[in-house]
Image (cartoon, rainbow, N blue to C red):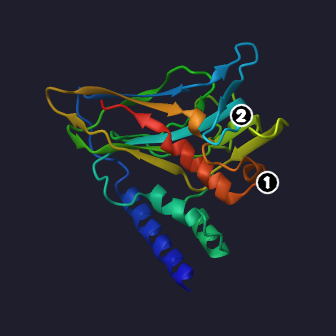
Amino acid sequence: MQTSNRQCSLLFSLLVITVVSLSACGGGGSTAGTQIQLSVATQTDNAIHDDTTGEVSFTNLEGTSITLQQALITVSSVELATDCTGSSFASLADELRHMTTQAATLALDWLVPPAAAHTANAPTRYGVPHIIDVLVEEVTMLGILSPPLGDYCGTRWQLAAADEDAIGVSIYPEMNGYSVRISGNHSGSQDASINPFTIDLSLAPLPAERLLQPLLELTTDTLSADLRVTIHYDRWFDGVDMAALESGSSAAMDLLIGNIMDNFVQESP
C-alpha cells in the first residue's frame, strides 16, 4: 500500500509539472546580446586508445578490464535553471522509472509519449538532440542560448531517446530510438576470459537528468559565457557488476545510468 501511495503521489507531481511546463513553454524572453555557447567534450584519465581499431581500454575501480568498441549517447536538452531546490520532471520520473506497475507505465506513456523526443526550444532551453560518440575525444558544439539577464543556479542536462531528426542520426542511424548504445568486452583481474557485452537503452518515455550547479551570472557587463560539459566515460563502469549487466539486471542498468550522468563535469563559466 505504501508503494502504491508513493506511485500516486509521483504521478500527480509529474502531471502538475507537465501542465505547468506546457503553460510556460516559452521559457521567458531573450535578451539582445546575450550568448551562451553549449558544448560537450569527452575525456579519459588513464585509458589506452587503439588508433587502428578506434577501441578504448581502461580499468574500473574493481580492477575489471573494459574495452569499448562503441559508446554513443543522446544529449537531448540543456536548460538554464533558476530554481535548483525543487524536483524537476526528470528527477521525479527517474524514481517512478523503477516502479513497473501497469498503471504507472500507462500514465507515463500518456504524460510523455515515446515519440516526443524533442523538448521545445526557449531562450533558456536548448532542445535539439545531439548524438555524441564519446570514443571520439573532441568537442561537440551543441548550440547557442540567448537568455534574459539574471542569475542562474545551474544547468540541467538530459539524455533521452534520439529520433529521426536528431543531429548525428544520419551518421549513427542505429541510435534512432535510443539514448545509450555501448558495445565492448570485459575481463576480470582473476579471470583472463574475454566477455563481450552490448547495452541498448532507450530511456523512453523518461529522460535521465544531471543538474550541474556552477553559478552563471548574466549582467549588462557579462553578456556571454561558454558552458562546456566534459564526460569522463572511463568511470561509467565503476561499481557495476558486469555479469549482472550482461544479464539485463535493472539494478546494474540503473547504476550504469547513474554513473553516466554523475560523470558529466562542468567547469564554472
Q: At 69% from the left edge and 27% from the top edge, which residue is drawn? A: 57
Closer to the camera in the image, 246 or 28: 246
Element type at mark 1: loop
User: How far from the left and from the top, in percent, is residue 13?
Assistant: 43, 69
The answer to whether residue 148 shows anywhere in this view is yes
Mark 2 or mark 1, which has the lower sequence index?
2
Note whether 260 is above or below 255 in the view shown. Answer: above
Q: At 75% from the left edge and 13% from the top edge, which residue is drawn? A: 52
Tell me the amino acid under the disc marked 1: Ser
Q: Is residue 11 left or right of residue 174?
A: left
Note whether 153 is above or below 12 in the view shown. Answer: above
User: How far from the left and from the top, in percent, is residue 68?
Assistant: 71, 31
Element type at mark 2: strand
Give the residue at the far bottom of this rendering.
1
Badge 2 is on which residue?
Answer: 65
State the CA–CA distance, disc 2 to disc 1.
18 Å
Q: Is residue 155 left or right of residue 167?
A: left
The answer to whether residue 204 shows anywhere in this view is no
Note whether 51 is above or below 134 in the view shown. Answer: above
Could you classify mark 2 by the number of other residues whose Cα lies within 10 Å: few (under 14), some (14-19), or many (20 or more)? some
User: How far from the left and from the top, in percent, is residue 199?
Assistant: 73, 44
Badge 1 is on which residue?
Answer: 247
Closer to the camera in the image, 192 or 265: 192
**Quarter-of-image position of residue 123:** top left
User: How far from the left and from the top, in percent, is residue 82?
Assistant: 28, 49
Q: Quadrant of the C terminus?
A: top left
In this rendering, the label closer to the viewer, 2 or 1: 2
Could you classify mark 1 by the number of other residues whose Cα lies within 10 Å: few (under 14), some (14-19), or many (20 or more)? few
Give the residue at the far right of this rendering.
193
